Amino acid sequence: MELEGQWWKGQLAGDIYQALRNKELKLPSYKGQSPQLSLRRYFADLIAVISNRFRLCPTARHLAVYLLDLVMDRYDISVQQLHMVALSCLLLASKFEEREDRVPKLDTLNSLDCMSSVNLVLTKQNLLHMELLLLETFQWNLYLPTAAHFIEYYLSIAVHESDLHGGWPVVSLEKTGLYMAKYADYFLEVSLQDQAFLNYVPSLVAAACVASSRIVLRLSPTWPSRLQRLTAYSWDHLVACTERLLIAHDSDVKEANKQKLQQSNSQSSQALFHGPGQVSTVPQYLPHPTLQLAQQTCQPMPGSAHANASFMPHPGVLQKGAQSHDHLQPITHAHPAPLDAKVNLPFNRGYQVNTHYTCAAPCFDR
């Protein structure tokens, strides 16, 4: 742990970070014009579930979703073909970010329940065609920074002995650091699920994840000067993005409390009719309800793509079969204006992120 902390403070880590900051300024523009934009959340979750099944690193998962976003934004693709594209993006990202022995194998991918649920069988030839097509689309450049590439650098100084919790010194820096990393990872996954976060540069999203984690953990000051110097972001830069993350967190807490109440009522009924029993508790911190990363199987997409007319391909899109891998049809028709940070997410402007946060973190129970 000590050696790792020293590495993040070294010159090499700083040089890598600066290179990533320079690179993010040249990222491709995202217009949010895909005809299948409503399915984006489903495929992002699909990539997350499969990457968790193979224990891929967060940078591979985030890069895969970002590649998928760029492809969907440029081409009109059928729903059946989107499954192939999503998995190809995951494989490319895995090969770029992971060790070779961690890259998912074709046979293992085909054995997943989510593959049979959509009646999809991957072949080596089809995957090679799609991977080559994607590489040509990105001009063979997969050096595309995401928020996951910045988060560890920020977490290296996210907790300090000068921090206060509720006005008192932090009892255990190690324990607090572990919870900080856990919450930061949670907020990273929240940012992965909503394309509205593509309106912000990745380094800012990562900084907002750290700031949101400090708020939930009730650490003060919320955005200390050391983090301002490291990230080059003031608190004013982070407010809008942090609000979005905390609104999602509040929604998850309400859902968790609702499930806890339902479980409590169910157990009370069982105790009434079947005698006393051991009651399990629900942790106060739960991951996003729709991101069941611990599971190893995938559920079919709501409304079969073969039966629902709204999921049918648009004119000129790819058709199923080996011949469809030779080209993608660019989007040529006009779509609504690009994402607006003020309209795409239900926003509660009464939410003040700089006030005392009401949700206490379990690691500070005294």
Image: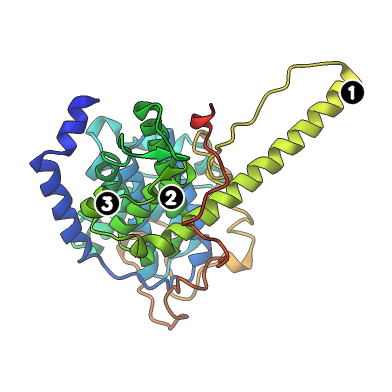
- For label 1, the crowd category at 10 Å Cα-Cα, with few meaning under 14, some 14 to 19 and many 20 or more, is few
Count of numbered tags = 3
Q: Is residue 43 visible?
A: yes
**Foreground pick, 245 / 82:** 245
**Foreground pick, 109 / 334:** 334
- Indicate the amino acid at tag 3: Ser
In the displayed structure, 70 sits above or below 44; it is below
Tell which circle, 1 or 2, labels the residue nearer the N-terminal end: 2
- Indicate the amino acid at tag 2: Ser
In the displayed structure, 257 sits above or below 64; it is above
Q: Do the residues labelled 1 and 2 touch (CB within 8 Å)?
A: no
Residue 190 position in % (x across, y down): 47, 51
- For label 3, the crowd category at 10 Å Cα-Cα, with few meaning under 14, some 14 to 19 and many 20 or more, is some
Q: Which residue is denoted by mark 1 in the rendering? A: 272
Q: Which residue is denoted by mark 3 in the rendering? A: 225
Q: Are marks 3 and 1 in contact (CB under 8 Å)?
A: no
Q: Which residue is denoted by mark 2 in the rendering? A: 212
Q: What element carries label 2?
A: helix
- Indicate the amino acid at tag 1: Leu
